[in-house]
Structures are given as C-alpha cells and as structure tokens.
Amino acid sequence: MVEYYLECITCGKKYKAEKGLYWCKDCGSIMGTLQIIYDYESLKKTIDRDSSFSERDSIVQFEELLPVRFSTDIDKFIGGTPLYKFKNKFGIENIMIKFDGISMSGSYKDRASIIAVNKALEEGYDTIFCASTGNAASSLALLSASTLLDTYIFVPSKIPRGKLVQLVAAGARIVPIESSYDQVFDISLDIGLKNNWYCRNSAVNPYLLEGKKTGAYEIIVQNNYEVPDYCIVAVGDGTVISSICKGFSEFYKLGLIEKIPKVLGAQAEGAATVKHVFENGKPYKPIIEDVDTVADSISVGNPRDVVKACTFMEKNGGYFTTVSDEEIIHAIGEMASETGIFSEPAGAATLACLKKLLSNGKIKSCDKVCLIVTGNGLKDVDALGELSNIRKYTVEEAYKLFEGVKYEV
Ligand SMILES: Cc1ncc(COP(=O)(O)O)c(C=O)c1O
Ligand SMILES: [Zn+2]
C-alpha cells in the first residue's frame, strides 16, 4: 500500500496511521481534523496520464492514491459514475454534470463508505457506525450489507422516506433520534467510540475524504485531462468540498493537470454556516447556527469539517454562494427537464448557484463549468411538494384530448 502520514489541519502535527486515531490529540475533533499526505514526488514516477487511469473504471483504479486495499465483492462497482456533457444549457456553452445519483445507494457518499468498510475490515473491527443526514447512512447500510460487519446507523428521525426505506431494506440497526443532525452526530460519537466500533463519520474520519476525492479525479480523467474553469458542489459539513479541492490539488501535484478548477460551494440560505465561517476570515473558528432548508442533506448548523473546508477553499481560490429553497426546488425541475438528470435538493443547489453566478456576472457563458450532483432525486420524492395540482382525466377525457390527432404508422 502507498505510504502516507496524517497531518493536523490546525497545528500541522504529523501522525503515523494508528488504529482508532481520527483527529489531532492536541486540537480535538473539530479544530484538529486530519488530512492524509502522500509522497507525491515518488508517486509522480509511477503515475502518468497514458497508462494509469481509464474513463469508466471504478474507484479501484485509484488504489495507488488511496490509503486502503480493496477487498470486498462490491468495490469495483463504486465510482465510475457518468460525466454528462451538454452544449448550451442554462446559459453555459459547455457544461458538464458529474452524476453520482446512479451510484449503488444513489449518492456520492458511496465513495466514502467503501473506504470505511474496507478500512474497518482491514483493522479487524466487527462493527461500524455512522451518524448522517440520510445519505451516508443509507450508503453505509447498503455497502456493508454484503460483508460480515454489524452496522449501526444514527439519524434524525425526520430523514426523508426515500433514505429511510434503504436503511430498513438493508437490515441495518437503525437509531432514529428525535433531534437535529448535529446532536445525532455527538450522540453517535459518544456511543460508537465507547463501544470500540469503527467510525464512518466523514467529518472526523480522515480516510473517508480520500474516497470522496476520487470524484474530482474522475472529472479530469473522463474529460480527457481538460480542466473545467469552475466546479460547483453542495456543502453541509464541508467534507465533500474539501475532498474535491484535495482531489484536484493532488492531480496538479502529480503533474497530471496544468491548472486547478475553481471550486465553488453551494449552500442553502437557511444553512450557510461554512460560508459564514469562511467569510469571517482566518483563523477559521467553528460556529454553531440554527438552520432550516428543504435540502436536508446540507442542513447542517454545526459543520464538523469547517476548518478543513475553509483552509482548502482558501488555497483553491474558490468561494461560497447561497441559494434560496425556492431556487433549489425550481432547479430540480429545470435540471431534470433540460438534461434528464433527476437530483435531490442538495445536488440541484449547484444549478441554482450557477444561475445566480451567471446573473451577477461572476461566471460567463464561455466558462467551462462542472456541476457535481451528489444525490438522486428518488431519495427525496416529497421535495417537489404534493403534486396534487397535476390534472387527472377520466378515460373518456383522455381519449378526447387526442381526438383528431393523426398517428404515423
Ligand atoms: C447529496 C449530498 N450532497 C452534498 C452533501 C454535503 O456534503 P458535506 O456534508 O460533506 O458538506 C451531502 C452530505 O450529506 C449529501 O448527502
Ligand atoms: Zn493539531
């Protein structure tokens, strides 16, 4: 396996990999999130554009750049999601959409869960747990199902039905708690770590970001190493956006690309804590806010990976934008009807964000843009409302509608 060490995002202290080490012992779980660092100079000698990666391969193709050995039956079915390319959509001449809604559990979280499952098995754990707004939970439940791991899932009791049914079907041990995601997170850490279970909470487990960074790798490989100008992704805890920044930056360090796309974070107006911390400036100090948005996946008021997200975004040169719930809901329909891609609210927030940035001139129609759609619309079928205003017809009325229509044979 590739050599690596872990480094504290705040104090820079370096750690060797060690079972049960999730964050810096001096800085704690939020200020001291760790990042995994490789020897890029030596990796450069073995990795090149022509022979290393191919377009529709799974996450396994990136094993040389990951701190884990793949060993389960499902590894080669994770990642390798499509990168759609459209001309002249949404006011952009060339737009790409990376769609992880077709992944095994229907979200981007599978990239992290597969690392967690493999790591837990590698380190000899028999139980794994996570706290989640829903997607990480259903992802872990489904991706651990074929292994010998017992799985405990802590979720807010109000998660969308689409995500809950996946948990039930997968037979995970579910603990729905009548509280916010932020509280559920704390409870899960308390219980899980006391019981010596493997922790699949992305925001504190540095290995999981490594799985998520492969989405950025794939965008580059699938676009034949042509780099988009902007890449937009939804932000809750801040792990996914950190992983996207890291993925692009690593490909740059390896000499595989000549520039790094600007990464832009899409947050809901009612849940924009990472944006607020970023704009408060350095040193990045976590804050806790009350939040409320229709985009349940990014409804996070105590973001756990905020220090890393802000640090990486500062290096990347990107920024955050907020969009209203109305704009998000509208974007779900617009994306589906223009491209055929059906996204859950968080994923559609990226399109809402793009439209805002186009209208205020920050993005131009000739810019090359990639939206990362992180979750499938079937996860949250209630997001579009009741749908009760859809006109229904009697059989006679239906025939009448088409009276006089000539059909070609
Ligand atoms: C569909 C979807 N998009 C985006 C995110 C945001 O990721 P993060 O919480 O790491 O910022 C999540 C997290 O749950 C998600 O489920
Ligand atoms: Zn530290």
Image (cartoon, helix red, strand yellow):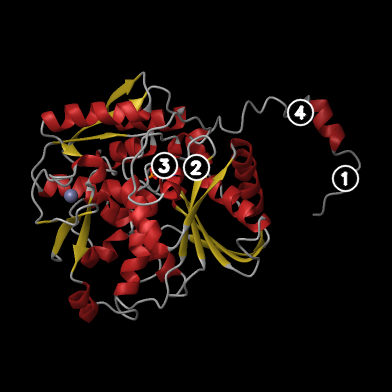
How far apart are the alpha carbons under marks 1 and 4? 20 Å
Tell me which numbered mark, 3 or 2, is placed earlier along the sequence.
3
Badge 3 is on which residue? 236
Residue 409, horizontal then vertical, whole percent = 79, 54
Q: Do the residues labelled 3 and 4 touch (CB within 8 Å)?
A: no
Instruction: Tell which tag, 1 or 3, sits nearer the viewer.
Output: 3
Camera sees residue 57: no
Q: Do the residues labelled 3 and 2 touch (CB within 8 Å)?
A: yes
Q: Is the C-beta of the residue carrying label 3 under 8 Å from the nearest atom of ligand 1?
A: yes
Label 3, secondary structure: give it: loop
* Among numbered discs 1 and 4, the one appearing first in the sequence: 4
As rendered, which of 220 and 409 lies closer to the eye? Answer: 220
Check whether the beta carbons of the residues at disc 1 and disc 4 lie within 8 A of each other.
no
| In contact (CB < 8 Å): disc 1 and disc 2 | no
Residue 391 image label: 4
**Which residue in the structure is indicated by mark 1?**
405
Disc 2 or 4, which lies upstream in sequence?
Answer: 2
Q: In which quarter of the image is residue 302?
A: top left
- Mark 1: amino acid: Val
Residue at the (59%, 68%) spot, across then down: 367
Give, as a three-letter code, the residue at label 3: Gly
| Marks 1/3: CA–CA distance | 50 Å
What kind of residue is marked 4? Answer: Arg
The quadrant in which the N terminus is found is bottom left
Residue 346 — which label?
2
Q: 371 or 78: which is nearer to us? A: 371
> Is 363 or 408 nearer to us in this picture?
363
Distance from Cα at disc 3 to Cα at disc 2: 9 Å
